[in-house]
Amino acid sequence: MLSLIIKRILWAIPVLWIVATLTFVMVRIVPGGPFDAEKNLPPEIVANIKAKYHLDRPIYEQYFLYMGRLSHGDLGVSYKYVNRTVNDILASALPVSAELGGLGLLIAIAVGIPLGTLAAVRRGSGTDVGAMLVATIGISVPGFVVGAVLIFVFGIWLKVLPVALWEGPRSVILPALTLAASPAAYLARLTRASVLEILDKDWVRTARSKGLSARVTVVKHVLRNALVPVITVLGPLTAILITGSFVVEFIYAIPGMGRFFITAVSNRDYDLIMGTTLVFGLLLIITNAIVDAAYTILDPRMRVEG
Amino acid sequence: MTSGTGNLFVETEPLAEAIEHTPPSGRISRGMLRDGFARLRRMPAPFTCFGIVVVLLAVALLSSAGVQFTPYGFDQTNRALLSAAPSYAHPMGTDELGRDLLTRIIYGARLSISIGFFTAAVAFVLGTTYGSIAGYKGGKIDAFLMRGVDVAYSMPDLLVMILIRVMLPVELGRSTFGILLALGLVSWMGTARLVRAQLLQLRHEEFIDAALAAGQSSLNILTKHLLPNAIGPIIVALTFTVPSAILAESTLSFIGLGLSPPACSWGTLANDGWRSLRVHPHLILFPSLFIFITVLSFNILGDGLRDAFDPRTRLGK
């Protein structure tokens, strides 16, 4: 199974190469470069800056220069954050986003899966209707609205938590909650549907009729099977978290991957756009590989030689 | 089931329709559609949401047609009333330039709602075509086409949209067209997968063999027999496409990578309001509320339609 994961991760190399090439070419062939925004710079200076970053060379030459450096793990330099390499920026931003994303994911799982299971077990009851109403509201509220409400209530009105920035453990709470809202709701809806399907199975009735309590049946038999589709959404879930991080890091001014990506796009900071995109791509490939591996653990029928 | 008797019995005998419901042929599947909507009418929450959607759509269309709902112009400023709180004259207050917020929200509805519907239309055309080819041809073509969808599907929409935006010239990327292009390109994959799965299931039904034996062309079989029978799930999927497009546009505009002034959508209005959250919370409250109500209505309507077309998932016994 380990070899399966390794095989999938090795696949990452050609995929990332395609992503890098596409982004590289597309970003550069359109008009508008990173130094257009600087006001009234004399053309000589612009030419000098461009020469410094090799932007005056033909595009294929730039491409080979970039790929040459990339193969050594050198992601280039930022044009906007002067004297910072992309590697340096990513090294500082990735842990921040990982902490935020990891905590968000934990909260989402801790809320979403129990809520969905409870709703399914008490199907048709007030609990079910209430839980699904909350979950439907959860997937309908834009992340920035959740953030604005939390900031307004806890930061401005009650003044109990910091409204922004990334300083100390207390400043993690609001961003993590904002990030978790949508995936928690998504997980709750999915878990409910999945558990409902399993509850209909004959072997659940068998488990109950041989005297197992409802609780043991659900926890030991139903959940194990119902969680297979839930695990498979780990991929889309990572996608939701990445998307969420754009918004959350923007509104809380958190120096993570999402915020650097957004500012890089606004500034057309080519190498930084490439660097962040490649990291996001790698992240998605790794989660999808984990999903494939998790399949085989949870459902032995899926086990293939590999 | 003919329409007359069908509608008569629908209220009293929900089972009758299920028993009489015989699948396969273009005509009866239109009846299936009607049955679905008849069931929807008996679901209070989704049907209410359907009403809300109709009202919002009507307001957006009438506003585009030039109907004025408020006595103000959408860009009419009033220096005496900057960032005023809600009042009788301005039920949602005014923004930092003294423009009436309700007027601007109605104006923004045009863009936000048309973006949602346009994206669903693109998803329908692209997704159905792509999915039909994959599902109808099957085999290697199918495997190849679906592998492509899998890769594209696993990318976060917003990441792809932002990258598409970067790849367009600056002015084009910030225009409504740029946003529509980006949304259209990320939104069709779900529909394509769904159409393919439906066709793979239906392809081996007897009525398709019958149509083939009768010498009908592939295109005819696809458009007259296969797609009409898959229309229920397709409609459900499109109902969910509209709110995700509205959410994506507003999020993109909110983080400053979407539309830029003078274009005005609920997302750009929320972005304007965000900057004065501390002092004038109403400026972000009202646009957010409209985004929320619209997206929620579409989601509940979508859930309702799904249950209406597939009674197995219905809440309750």
Image (spheres, rainbow, N blue to C red):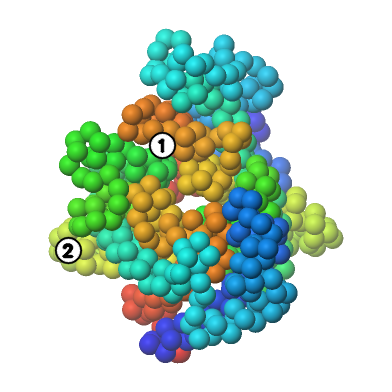
Relative image position of residue A288 (x, y in whole percent) = 45, 72
Rendered-image quadrant of the N terminus of chain A: bottom left
The kind of residue on which mark 2 rests is: Val
What residue is drawn where x is 42% and y is 22%? B83
Q: CA distance from mark 2 to mark 1?
A: 51 Å
The answer to whether residue A213 is left or right of residue B254 is left
* Image point (62%, 81%), residue name: A65
**Numbered disc 1: what chain?**
B
Kind of residue sitting beneath label 1: Arg
- The reply to whether label 2 and label 1 mark residues of one chain is no
| Quarter assignment of residue B263 | top right
User: Which residue is drawn at the image coordinates 55% and 83% (left, top)?
Assistant: A69
- Percent across and percent down for residue A72 are 50, 86
Quadrant holding the C terminus of chain A: bottom left
Q: Vertically, is B2 above or below A21?
A: above
Q: Which mark is residue B275?
A: 1
